[in-house]
Amino acid sequence: MRKRRFKLDKTKIAVSVLLIAALLVGCSGGGGGGGASGDGPLNVSIMTMYYTPEPPGKDNVVVKEIEKRTNTKLNITWVSPNNYADKVNVTLASGDIPDLMLLDNAFTAQVRTMVAQGALWDLTPYIKDYPNLMKFPKETWTNTKQADGKNYGIPRVRPVEGGGFVYLRKDWMDKLNLEVPKTIDEFYDVLKAFVEKDPDGNGKDDTIGYASFVDQSGMASLGQLQNVFTKTNGDWSLVDGKLVNVNLLPGVRDALVWMNKVYREKLLPEDLATLKNSQAKDMLKAGRAGGFQDTVEAAWEPTEELRKTDPKADFLPLVSLNGYVNRDSGFFGMYAIPKTVPEAKMKKLLELMDYGASDEGSDLASFGIKDVHYKEENGVKVPTEQAKTDIVAQQALGQIFIKYDKYLRAYRSGMPSDVLERNKQIIDERAKLSVPEVAVGLNSDTNTKVGTELGKKIQDMKTKVILGKAPIEEWDRFVGELKNDPDLLKITEEINASYQQRISSSE
């Protein structure tokens, strides 16, 4: 307990330091870096993450080009996603926060404390003046609002359609004269055929229906199949105007019964409780498995690998099952601006990010310079070898400067135009019926304290039922206890209070 108090006190001290510094800067009329008053390039410090093997260097040719076009001097601290959360915690606690800082989780207790104590800029009154940022989906801005209904960051925008859902071997279905499944029963029939009817034609009983796995904290690649039964995206379902934990609903029970059945029939990997994501993907690339759960464009990854030896190989993302498909939140973190930055510079930073959300700025950051870093082929930007050399990619600078693109999850490098166009159609079809997550950003202090352990307890029972180590009646008894669990009752109360606060603040 003493250790937890110490961490909280450190956060409060850091916030106080930020507030005092902001007052001092405001009183002194400090410029906060060149460019805020038109006196040369604007000095901008940024902290973000990268997904390329190495981050771009200070002299990166595209960084220099962005600086030239925006009259800025960018000092970017690149951090690996493997330890980004730790870096955020240390940086926020230090009080020495960069001008633009990616908060990959916009709703941690630390961020909420800083928001409540005024350590971050409230951008709500300003964003309407930046046309490219205003092109972000309404959900993107709504889902990044804090408890008071205000926006304290520029969302790292993502499309709301095309997120992780089921994809299946279309060439196997064609070979076995199977229709693309639209219901969970048809999906079962496809998996059974994949296992029993030798879809790869090698004469061996060596294929797996669905390369799925679970982990200690959740349903992992079986998550969306559970959602098909509950018709709920996430852990909370809106029932008669109140949020109810999805595990208390009969849909989860139905899902577990179904999953136990397909596991017993060996349509899922035998070791799904210990299997890792990379191992599941290896099954797909080796031609051993007929399906998986991932984003629309990610289905191209195993397809591309298989086509090296089998030109007809084809993984098809499904539109929906039982009329359900998930709708994403429209963001992956946000860029916050500390109150130590003067208002004039804050507006310049919004101007910079607005440029990054334009066609020109976003394409420059993600693809580089035309005919140097990419070639246009049939309307598709194809990276050159120079792009790899200069570390030009959506996975690097494209994590800072990015426009809203409805079809962002339709394309991957090297994908032929017919697959791209099919993916766009799938995304359009999903948009007609996708289900949003209602509890994005809602706060429960109790969940922060005990939610992880409670989640592991719930998942442990689910895994036992799926593997047949516990009968479904044991799940029924577990749910009966869960309904009266004091921690879950408190979490439910707090989540609903947060939900009502969000509704009232947006009215």
Image (tube, grey):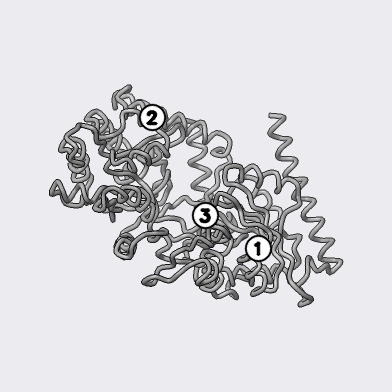
Residue furthest left as drawn: 177
In the depicted structure, whether residue 381 falls above or below residue 259: below
> What kind of residue is marked 1?
Asp
- Image position, residue 303 (x, y; %): 32, 50
How crowded pointer 3 is (Cα within 10 Å; few <14, some 14-19, many 20+) is rated as: some
> Residue 97 falls in which quadrant of the image?
bottom right
Res. 18 in view: yes
- Image position, residue 400 (x, y; %): 58, 61
Q: How far apart are the two marked residues, 1 and 3, measured between alpha carbons?
A: 19 Å
Res. 106 in view: no
Number of residue marks = 3
Q: Nearer the viewer, residue 178 or 121?
A: 178
> What kind of residue is marked 3?
Phe
In the visual, does 266 lie left or right of 135? left
Q: Nearer the viewer, mark 1 or mark 3?
A: 3
Q: Secondary structure at mark 3?
A: strand
Q: How far apart are the two marked residues, 1 and 2, measured between alpha carbons?
A: 44 Å
Pointer 1 or 3: first along the chain: 1
> What kind of residue is marked 2?
Ala
Residue furthest top as drawn: 469
Residue ID for mark 2: 273
- Residue 357: which disc? none
> Residue 476 falls in which quadrant of the image?
top left
Residue that appears at 62% across and 60% down? 152
- Image position, residue 161 (x, y; %): 39, 59
Residue ID for mark 3: 332
